[in-house]
Amino acid sequence: MYSYILYCSFSKSKVSNAELKELLKKSVEWNSRESITGLLIYRFNKEFNRGNFLQIIEGPKRSIDNVWPRIINDNRHHTVTILEEGSYDQRNFSNWSMGFKNLKEKDLKELPGFLELTDEKFWEDISNYKPRAFQLLKSFYDN
């Protein structure tokens, strides 16, 4: 049985490519030790001059419980919103200690049904978007 948490958050400032590489490097090291797999997506929004993170982590409950405080206390982001959490029998991101995608504006236009996190519709009933967020992450993994 594997636990998972799927969340989104806002970056406090623009995260540079060098910072993203360092974040990914440290995540891979930590996750490899803790038997955690998952995917992190980052996108910088020029209009609002901030970025968004969308991440899923999965692994043994003990490992998820150990890493979660590190994630929510990371000073690179704020307004951490759990979209979904729970458990399942097998991993969905088994080959990635931490997959990563830095989305550009053009990438978003190619995603069917993409809804901006700053759109009021997203926040009206966030539970409507749980399956969509998971499917978005899974589509990056499967391709």
Image: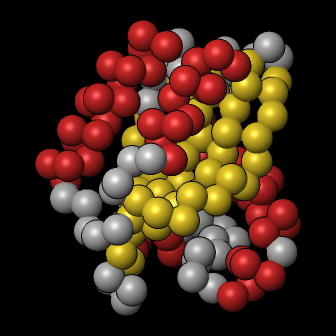
Q: Position of residue 96 (x, y in %)?
A: 48, 24
> Which part of the image, by quadrant, shows the C terminus?
top right
Q: Is residue 135 above or below residue 128?
A: above
Q: Position of residue 103 (x, y in %)?
A: 39, 61
Find residue 13 and report its image quarter: bottom left
Q: Is residue 2 above or below residue 132?
A: above
User: Total marks drawn?
Assistant: 0
Q: Position of residue 51 (x, y in %)?
A: 38, 69
Residue occupying the point 33% across, 19% down: 29
- Left or right: where does residue 9 sit relative to residue 139? left
- Left or right: where does residue 113 sit relative to residue 94? right
Q: Is residue 25 above or below residue 46?
A: above
Residue occupying the point 26% across, 30% down: 25
Instruction: Specify whether residue 141 is in view.
Output: no
Residue occupying the point 59% across, 75% down: 117
Way the structure is coloured: secondary structure
Residue occupying the point 67% across, 39% down: 5
- Left or right: where does residue 18 sit relative to residue 138? left
Instruction: Specify whether residue 97 is in view.
Output: yes
Find residue 97 and report its image quarter: top left
**Which is nearer the eye, 63 or 125?**
63
Q: Position of residue 108 (x, y in %)?
A: 49, 70
- Left or right: where does residue 112 sit relative to residue 84? left
> Which part of the image, by quadrant, shows the N terminus?
top right
